[in-house]
Image (spheres, rainbow, N blue to C red):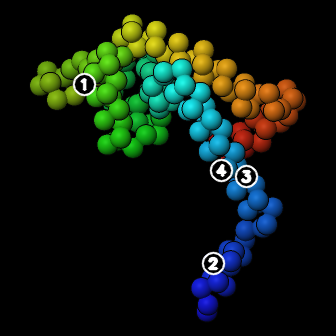
Amino acid sequence: MSRRSFTTRKPALLSEVVELAWVRLMRSQRRIFESIERDLQAEGCPPLAWYDVMLELDRAEDGRLRPMEIERRTLFAQPNLSRMIARLEREGLVRREAFSDDGRGHWVVITEQGRRKRAAMWEIYGAAIEKHLGARLTDGEAEHLADLLAKLV
């Protein structure tokens, strides 16, 4: 079998329309995400991933979660999350608190500075979502898209 025929072969159960939907979903997600990241960066904000961690902490009871809970809620890989938490801590946006007597386990707790930073980021993030997604869809189209995507979750 030549290399060309191997790379163009599709699985028997994948229709062209499903492939097209997949490609468009992935491309649109990446492009919108990159556009939002640029908007945040232009305003001097930290990366969007920081926002996601601070949001989950802000929503949590007492503003605290265990690292594994943050990992589960955000889907960040553990090594990446550990480095991110360390950076957030250096910036004063979160702090760690021991939850066991031996000090091995810890909570990640959002600080007041972290709450203010997340709220400030939301002003830019929300406007960027509107600019890169909302302005391109009617409310009806956005509702239909949300319904379709809900089927995948």
Find the distance from the CA under tag 2 to the CA under tag 3. 19 Å
Query: Any mark on residue 26, and which?
Result: 4
12 w.r.t. 93: above or below: below
User: Residue 6 falls in which quadrant of the image?
Assistant: bottom right
| Mark 3: amino acid | Arg
Q: Given contact means CB atoms under 8 Å apart, are the residues at marks 3 and 1 in contact? A: no
Number of residues whose C-alpha sits closer than 10 Å to that of mark 4, classed few (under 14), some (14–19) or many (20 or more): few
Question: Could you tell me which residue is drawn at 39 percent across and 7 percent down?
Answer: 112
Residue 124 location, x and y as percent? Answer: 60, 19
Disc 2 is placed on an element classified as helix
| Mark 4: amino acid | Met
Find the distance from the CA under tag 4 to the CA under tag 1. 36 Å
Q: Given contact means CB atoms under 8 Å apart, are the residues at marks 3 and 4 in contact? A: yes
**Disc 2 designates what residue?**
7
Disc 4 is placed on an element classified as helix
**Lower sequence index among marks 3 and 1:** 3
Depth-wise, is mark 4 or mark 1 nearer the camera?
4
| Mark 2: amino acid | Thr
Which quarter shows the N terminus? bottom right
**Lower sequence index among marks 4 and 1:** 4
Which quarter shows the C terminus? top right
| Mark 1: amino acid | His
3 vs 18, left or right, is: left
**Disc 3 designates what residue?**
24
